[in-house]
């Protein structure tokens, strides 16, 4: 599979022959602890790339490597041609699986968090931070909930707050780990739609891990299918459906169905070995 | 405004008022029943004592205990001894907390020192600390210092163990959020780890309050000449059991009051909102 976008412009994210093992309690690398197997991938500026694969295959490990939470066993990752080393707090925003909101903070204070502790926010005084957080909450449709605590919000609202927080310090690379996975089907479509709109306005570079094929097709420019553990790239698909895409109408397009069928066929093959193992 | 609109705007409030009224009435009924139970029990006790069905040497009687309390309140015995016990429990508690929370945080975040210290902490925690009381009498004498040391040995480990557990229970994703947001080590502690572990730590503090009082009382019973524990030991030595009951009653009320105070304080912290994470 050729990588067209990376040949025309300098990629923002480059993953080169990355292999990752988790150490077992004795500090050894075993075949079973291999999470990522020789992955190479480049992502162009403003590109939206999704990674799909069987659950537990090591997709999230790839995000954690890019964020700098963990170091790869072999290979190299770079962002804007600088090697990833240590937590990439100046360059990337990370949207966590589930909402990961801090329960002791109000909605507004949660969105302000990256501005309070990060470098981008240190240039703003506290009222400017508040204004920024408030405008983000308005943008995700939560204008009236700024003084509520996460425990008082629905799942959908919490995920919107999490989205606002991810956008708070304006980073143009966003890593997303199954961001909408915890939502019910209808809420998920709505929040995806809101996110698609925001993305089309700001055009950040996004790498998103998901297990939801519809979500991947809806949001992405390219979709990477991973094998079962250890995760290797099985195939890469371009999503040719033009933007702006209407989240609600998309499933009626033939192009959508064609791609969905291809992705499912790939993924299905990768699910089988798991079935054999568990049988 | 149509009728339906009027109903829609008015009826929810009516419903809320009714529910609130019902709750109020229920609370009143519970309180009244509780008072009734106490009056009935005290009445039966007193009647039994007067009729010689209950041996007043062992079990005293509500009137005797009350008279004792009134006398103590009048001559200052009650206030001065209560203040001594409170002072010892409070000081021992504060010293424990001030030391245990930072040490616990350090141990929880340092894999090496956590591993080194674990057997010592487990062993110290499994030792009945009151067994050290005679040692502390020799080391610190008969004054307050000995009681404060005893309170410390009890409270310190409760708070330490809860702090370690709390910091270890902080979700890794909270820490990662802090780090990816660019938090320095200090900010990570102040804005993520301490607040996230706060529910656990507060639960430890709540657990430790009655133990602090118990530590002071046990110390007082063993040595010295002041405090509510001393009153208990002194009165029972003189075979004045009404005095023992009176002192224990004061201790019970004191413990209860301290508990309520701590619960109230906790309800005013941000952790009251932590949902499942606060252990209330």
Image (cartoon, coloured by chain):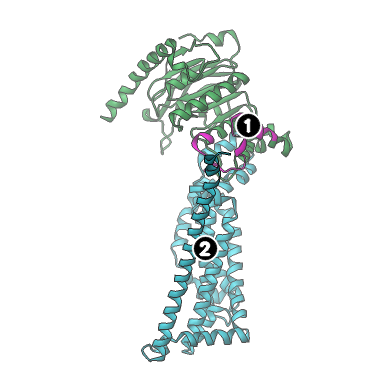
Chain colours: A green, B cyan
User: Along the horizontal axis of the image, is A105 left or right of B19?
Assistant: right
Query: Which mark is drawn over residue B208?
Result: 2
Q: Image quadrant of residue A237?
A: top left
The one of A108 and A119 positioned closer to us in this rendering = A108
Q: Image quadrant of residue A211?
A: top left
Query: Which mark is drawn over residue B38?
Result: none
Other residues around mark 1 within 10 Å, as few (<14) / some (14–19) / many (≥20): some
- Whole-percent x, y for residue A122 in the image: 71, 35
Is A148 covered by the magenta stretch? yes
- Whole-percent x, y for residue B10 in the image: 55, 46
Magenta residues span A131-157
Residue at point 56%, 8% (across, down): A7
User: Along the horizontal axis of the image, is A258 left or right of A219?
Assistant: left
Residue ID for mark 1:
A138
Q: Are marks 2 and 1 on the same chain?
A: no
The one of B82 and A273 positioned closer to us in this rendering = B82
- Whole-percent x, y for residue A18 in the image: 48, 21
Q: Main secondary structure of the magenta part?
A: helix
- Whole-percent x, y for residue A137 in the image: 62, 33
Quick check: A234 above or below B3?
Answer: above
Q: Chain of mark 2?
A: B
Choose mark 2 or mark 1, whichever is in front: 1
Is A20 covered by the magenta stretch? no
Q: Quadrant of the N terminus of chain B?
A: top right
Q: Image quadrant of residue B72?
A: bottom right
The one of A152 and A174 positioned closer to us in this rendering = A152
The answer, for residue A73, to whether it is visible in the render is no
Local SS, label 1: helix
């Amino acid at each position: 599979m050729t990588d067209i976008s990376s040949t025309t412009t300098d990629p923002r994210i480059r993953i080169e022959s990355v292999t990752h093992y988790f150490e077992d309690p004795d500090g050894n690398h075993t075949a079973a602890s291999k999470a990522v197997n020789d992955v190479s991938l480049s992502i162009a500026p403003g590109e939206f790339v999704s990674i799909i694969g069987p659950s537990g295959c090591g997709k999230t490990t790839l995000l954690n490597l890019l964020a700098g939470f963990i170091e790869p066993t072999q290979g190299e990752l770079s962002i804007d041609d600088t090697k990833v080393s240590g937590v990439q707090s100046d360059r990337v925003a990370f949207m966590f699986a589930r909402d990961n909101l801090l329960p002791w903070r109000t909605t507004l204070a949660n969105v302000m968090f990256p501005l309070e502790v990060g470098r981008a926010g240190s240039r703003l005084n506290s009222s400017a931070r508040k204004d920024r957080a408030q405008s983000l909450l308005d943008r995700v449709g939560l204008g009236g909930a700024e003084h509520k605590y996460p425990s008082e919000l629905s799942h959908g609202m919490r995920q919107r707050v999490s989205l606002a927080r991810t956008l708070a310090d304006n980073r143009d690379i966003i890593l997303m780990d199954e961001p909408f996975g915890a939502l019910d089907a209808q809420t998920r479509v709505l929040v995806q739609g809101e996110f698609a709109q925001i993305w089309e306005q700001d055009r950040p570079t996004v790498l998103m891990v998901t297990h939801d094929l519809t979500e991947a097709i809806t949001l992405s420019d390219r979709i990477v299918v991973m094998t079962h553990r250890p995760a290797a790239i099985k195939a890469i698909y371009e999503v040719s459906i033009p933007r702006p895409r209407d989240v609600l109408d998309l499933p009626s397009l033939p192009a959508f169905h064609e791609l969905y069928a291809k992705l499912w066929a790939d993924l299905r093959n990768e699910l089988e070995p798991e079935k054999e193992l568990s049988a | 405004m149509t009728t339906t609109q009027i109903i829609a705007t008015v009826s929810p409030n009516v419903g809320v008022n009714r529910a609130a009224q019902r709750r109020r009435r229920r609370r009143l009924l519970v309180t009244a029943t509780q008072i009734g139970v106490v009056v009935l029990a005290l009445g039966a006790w007193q009647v039994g004592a007067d009729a010689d069905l209950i041996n007043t040497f062992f079990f005293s009687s509500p009137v005797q205990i009350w008279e004792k309390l009134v006398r103590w309140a009048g001559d200052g015995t009650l206030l001065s001894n209560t203040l001594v016990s409170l002072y010892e429990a409070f000081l021992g508690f504060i010293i424990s907390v001030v030391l245990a929370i930072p040490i616990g945080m350090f141990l929880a975040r340092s894999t090496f020192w956590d591993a080194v210290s674990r057997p010592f902490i487990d062993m110290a925690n499994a030792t009945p600390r009151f067994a050290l009381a005679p040692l502390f009498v020799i080391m610190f004498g008969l004054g307050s210092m000995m009681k404060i040391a005893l309170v410390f040995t009890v409270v310190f480990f409760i708070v330490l163990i809860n702090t370690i557990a709390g910091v270890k229970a902080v979700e890794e994703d909270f820490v990662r959020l802090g780090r990816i947001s660019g938090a320095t080590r200090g900010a990570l502690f102040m804005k993520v780890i301490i607040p996230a572990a706060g529910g656990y730590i507060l639960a430890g503090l709540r657990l430790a309050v009655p133990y602090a009082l118990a530590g002071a009382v046990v110390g007082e019973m063993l040595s010295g000449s002041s405090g509510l524990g001393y009153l208990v030991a002194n009165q029972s030595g003189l075979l004045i059991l009404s005095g023992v009951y009176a002192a224990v009653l004061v201790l019970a009320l004191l413990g209860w009051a301290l508990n309520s105070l701590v619960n109230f304080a906790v309800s005013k912290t941000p952790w009251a909102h932590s949902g499942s994470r606060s252990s209330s």
